[in-house]
């Protein structure tokens, strides 16, 4: 709100405006009670309209008011009626104006620096970090007294407390809650590298800013300069200051202090601002001569002290500012006389979108051909509406593309102005600048990816599983198969056109190739295919100029030359990045994107919740867990666990009475999906060892493990040990997953649900009359119901995504995981023939780690009704790599 002279704010009378900025508008005012001049800062309207943030700000302001120091502008109070902060009015000019007149002599800079250090030390001792120290926030009074302004306000104001500005010295102070990682916080020219990366910062970020300010006072130039925010941040992350800008007369001790403040690695940086204060005192006592060091060399000849080399592909920050680095370097690459250095940075998930479950945050992410935007599937953070979102790399939030509701797996037209996506049983297209979506063709079971060439031909997988087809992007065309499933193959996915627009590479899957993906080359002009290579990832191939195949092999992003004439790989593959996952995207502009698979990025944890969904405590710290199963007597918990992302799962047992854990299996291959016997004394689990199948073992560890499935039963997953001695499971024995029962007396298998669809996770109701199961007859799984033993009738239980159905002990409720959002859900069951279902509601928002990593991501304690759930603790970010060719071996 704008205030005018004479207007009252509580006991304060407005005199006139003093200025405005990202932190709000500032006015000179008179305290009518104490008859003193004060400054009134009115908070931005976007901030003031958020009651939660306003309440939090008032709490922060109370802490900041405790800063009572002669070099800190004090906070007097907060007038909630006007959303205004009342502060000490500091006369004088700010340090940025002093520096504009020219570099300060050492004798003039030292007292200012010492007082800034005193202020920082007093605040740090109270646990308060400035987070936005810069010359514009330092006032120098006529008597030489220095006052540091806006202490801690960056944290207090929160993520919306800044407005855009193009001038780097006053670039937007982008803020975030202290617990939110991934939002940029600070001002570009003075941000510490870790601050630019969006990480949680400590007092060492203030020490970095202090070094930048000290350098600027002595040199008259910014330590990290650029034409705009993005290039300034690039300098912070990539370049050392121009040390020759410091006058030759600068004391060596002072230069050494600045170097220690500007260590990019916080672990090597000056740890306490009190050390800087002492160093400044020593320089001052030496009369500015630098007596603590050897005679000073001319500044132009000085070099930085030995430090760790700056890695050329520094992982840059998350969010708006760091994404802007990408654009800045993209522009620099076209004008620089020498090849630009590779630059790597990650982009955190946008705050206004909730990730879909069962995959990376950027679900099916697709980078636009111009390298400026990324399209992905997500859900609105408030409404849960699922669709295709587009995020510019220079923006914090993503925008839902109108008309893409329920959209999945988007891919771009060559123009970067149109997106194709799967939704509601169709392959569709929509223009970003508006207009209604156009249905291109039917896609009854959805698809995984597609590719669009310059002739408006799309290659896509409109049936899953199934071959690839070609279809006109203009619609009205009948899809024509362009690949043929070979013996042992079950599905073709993720096509990518090569430069000629006629040949394309795709992924071939099949049970007989043991979960390994083969990359084949095919052509629009022929159904003949040729094998390229095989990897253990299904969405991780693309072509990139000039003449490289990019793919992921065992978690490493690789590049290998490919002859686009003969379509043959040449030479050796070269590593570009570790801990990588698909999809890979490469734009003609030179940008490359992939998702990361660092340990914390894909970890989960096991927690207890009660029947109402309230969390009752963590069972594990974040790590790698799967398939929690509570014994029927409620005394023990079985679960799969591995020690690293690339490790193998083993079965562990926890005694719920004592809390002790014991490892049950020790095979180097994966042991997964434990289920308990009705007597709580045995476990059946799935093993990928040789021979593969289901194994049985006593829960106390005694005796040998017994294999209970035949050699033909590959990829078999137990889901329920039924009281009549049968286990319902699913097994990929052909073109799809099916459900069967297994007799433990004669090890005979009997199909229960078998069709062309993927059917999984069968669960028999407590009365033994009904079987719930998952099936994917469209782009996502739904829960269905049939008689037990099954009949021809199969009734839908969910229509908006469902999986992992489990019955309550009394059969009055059916729990399931939303296959759209990963939330734990429940539906009321009314007995009947068949039962009816009503009252679908959320129990816990999750997201549960269901699907690929778990055959069951939760379980119910039959005695107490409480549940253990497997919740993702963090998810993947999108990593962008610019000038990636610089990482190739010569």
Image: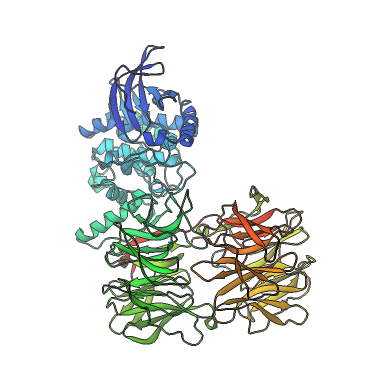
- Quarter of the image where the N terminus is located: top left
Looking at the picture, tell me which residue is in the foreground, 185 or 405: 405
Asked if residue 65 lies left or right of residue 335, the reply is right
Q: Quadrant of residue 346?
A: bottom left
| Residue 743 drawn at (x, y percent) | 74, 78
The number of discs equals 0
| Residue 552 drawn at (x, y percent) | 43, 71
The image shows residue 647, relative to residue 85, as above or below, that is below
Asked if residue 488 lies left or right of residue 14, the reply is right
Q: Residue at x 34, y 78 (%)?
A: 504
The image shows residue 121, relative to residue 804, as above or below, that is above
Way the structure is coloured: rainbow
| Residue 704 drawn at (x, y percent) | 75, 76
Residue most extreme to the front: 833
| Residue 121 drawn at (x, y percent) | 44, 32
Asked if residue 883 lies left or right of residue 627, the reply is left
Q: Quadrant of residue 19?
A: top left
Asked if residue 590 lies left or right of residue 531, the reply is left
Q: Residue at x 28, y 55 (%)?
A: 327
Q: Quadrant of residue 69?
A: top left
Tell me if I can see residue 877 in this picture. Answer: no
Tell me if I can see residue 536 in this picture. Answer: yes
- Quarter of the image where the C terminus is located: bottom left
The image shows residue 470, relative to residue 857, as above or below, that is below
The image shows residue 784, relative to residue 25, as above or below, that is below
């Amino acid at each position: 709100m704008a205030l005018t002279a004479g207007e009252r704010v509580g006991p304060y009378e407005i005199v006139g405006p003093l200025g405005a900025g990202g932190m709000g508008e500032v006015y000179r005012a008179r305290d009518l009670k104490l008859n003193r001049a004060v400054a009134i800062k009115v908070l931005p309207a976007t901030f003031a309209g958020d009651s939660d943030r306003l309440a939090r700000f008032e709490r922060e302001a109370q802490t900041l008011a405790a800063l009572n120091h002669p070099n800190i502008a004090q906070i007097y109070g907060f007038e909630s009626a006007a959303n205004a902060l009342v502060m000490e009015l500091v006369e004088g000019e700010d340090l940025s104006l002093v520096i504009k007149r020219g570099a300060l002599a050492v004798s003039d800079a030292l007292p200012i620096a010492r007082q800034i250090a005193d202020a920082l030390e007093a605040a740090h001792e109270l646990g308060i970090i400035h987070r936005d120290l810069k010359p514009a926030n330092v006032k120098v009074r006529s008597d030489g007294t220095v006052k540091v302004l806006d202490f801690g306000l960056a944290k207090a104001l929160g993520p919306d407390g800044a407005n855009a500005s193009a001038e780097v010295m006053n670039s937007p102070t982008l803020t975030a809650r202290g617990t939110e990682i991934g939002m940029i916080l600070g001002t570009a020219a003075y941000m510490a590298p870790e601050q630019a990366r969006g990480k949680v910062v400590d007092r060492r970020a203030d020490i970095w800013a202090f070094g930048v300010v000290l350098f600027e006072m002595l040199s008259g130039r910014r330590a990290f300069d650029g034409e705009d925010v993005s290039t300034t941040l690039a300098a912070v992350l990539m370049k050392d200051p121009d040390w020759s800008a410091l006058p030759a007369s600068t004391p060596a001790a002072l230069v050494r202090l600045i170097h220690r403040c500007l260590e990019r690695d916080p672990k090597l940086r000056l740890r306490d601002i009190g050390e800087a204060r002492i160093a400044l005192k020593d320089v001052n006592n030496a009369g500015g001569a630098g007596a603590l060091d050897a005679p000073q060399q001319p500044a132009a000849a000085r070099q930085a002290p030995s430090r760790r080399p700056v890695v050329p592909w520094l992982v840059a920050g998350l969010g708006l500012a760091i994404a802007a680095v990408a654009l800045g370097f993209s522009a620099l690459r076209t004008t620089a006389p020498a090849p630009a250095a590779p630059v790597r940075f990650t982009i955190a998930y946008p705050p206004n979108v909730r990730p879909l479950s069962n995959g990376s945050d950027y679900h099916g992410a697709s980078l636009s051909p111009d390298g400026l935007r990324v399209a992905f599937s997500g859900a609105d953070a408030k409404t849960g509406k699922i669709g295709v979102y587009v995020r510019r790399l220079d923006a914090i939030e993503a925008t839902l593309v109108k008309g893409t509701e329920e959209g999945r797996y988007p891919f771009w037209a060559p123009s970067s102005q149109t997106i194709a996506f799967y939704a509601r049983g169709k392959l569709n297209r929509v223009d970003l600048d508006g207009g209604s979506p156009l249905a291109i063709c039917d896609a009854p079971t959805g698809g995984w990816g597609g590719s669009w060439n310059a002739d408006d031909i799309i290659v896509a997988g409109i049936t899953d599983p199934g071959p690839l087809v070609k279809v006109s992007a203009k619609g009205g065309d009948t899809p024509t198969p362009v690949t043929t499933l070979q013996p042992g193959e079950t599905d073709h996915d993720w096509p990518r056109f090569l430069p000629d627009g006629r040949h394309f590479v795709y992924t071939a899957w099949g049970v007989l190739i043991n979960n390994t993906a083969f990359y084949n080359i095919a052509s629009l002009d022929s159904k003949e295919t040729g094998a390229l290579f095989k990897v253990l990832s299904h969405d991780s191939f693309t072509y990139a100029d000039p003449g490289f195949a990019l793919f992921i092999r065992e978690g490493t992003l690789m590049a290998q030359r490919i002859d686009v004439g003969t379509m043959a790989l040449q030479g050796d593959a070269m590593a570009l990045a570790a801990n990588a996952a698909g999809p890979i995207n490469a734009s003609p502009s030179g940008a490359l994107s992939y998702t990361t698979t660092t340990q914390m990025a894909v970890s989960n944890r096991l927690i207890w919740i009660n029947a109402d969904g309230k969390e009752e405590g963590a069972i594990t710290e974040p790590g790698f867990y799967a398939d929690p199963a509570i014994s029927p007597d409620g005394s023990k918990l079985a679960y799969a666990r591995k020690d690293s992302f690339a490790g193998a799962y083993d079965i562990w047992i926890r005694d719920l009475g004592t809390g002790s854990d014991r490892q049950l299996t020790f095979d180097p291959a994966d042991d997964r999906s434990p289920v308990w016997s009705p007597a709580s004394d045995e476990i059946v689990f799935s093993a990928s060892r040789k021979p593969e199948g289901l194994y049985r073992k006593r829960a106390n560890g005694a005796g040998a493990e017994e294999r209970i499935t035949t050699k033909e039963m590959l990829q078999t997953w137990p889901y329920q040990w039924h009281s009549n001695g049968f286990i319902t499971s699913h097994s990929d024995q052909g073109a799809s997953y099916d459900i069967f029962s297994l007799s433990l007396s004669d090890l005979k298998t009997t199909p229960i649900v078998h069709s062309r669809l993927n059917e999984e996770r069968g669960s028999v109701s407590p009365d033994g009359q009904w079987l719930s199961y998952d099936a994917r007859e469209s782009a996502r799984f739904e829960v269905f119901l049939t008689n037990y033993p099954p009949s021809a009738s199969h009734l839908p239980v969910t229509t908006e995504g469902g999986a992992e159905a489990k019955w309550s002990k009394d059969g009055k409720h059916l729990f399931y995981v939303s296959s759209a959002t990963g939330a734990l859900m429940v539906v009321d069951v009314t007995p009947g023939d068949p039962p009816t279902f009503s009252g679908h509601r959320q129990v816990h928002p999750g997201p549960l780690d269901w699907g690929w990593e778990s055959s069951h991501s939760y379980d119910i304690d039959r005695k107490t009704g409480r549940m253990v759930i497997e919740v993702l603790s963090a998810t993947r970010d999108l990593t962008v790599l610019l000038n990636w060719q610089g990482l190739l071996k010569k």
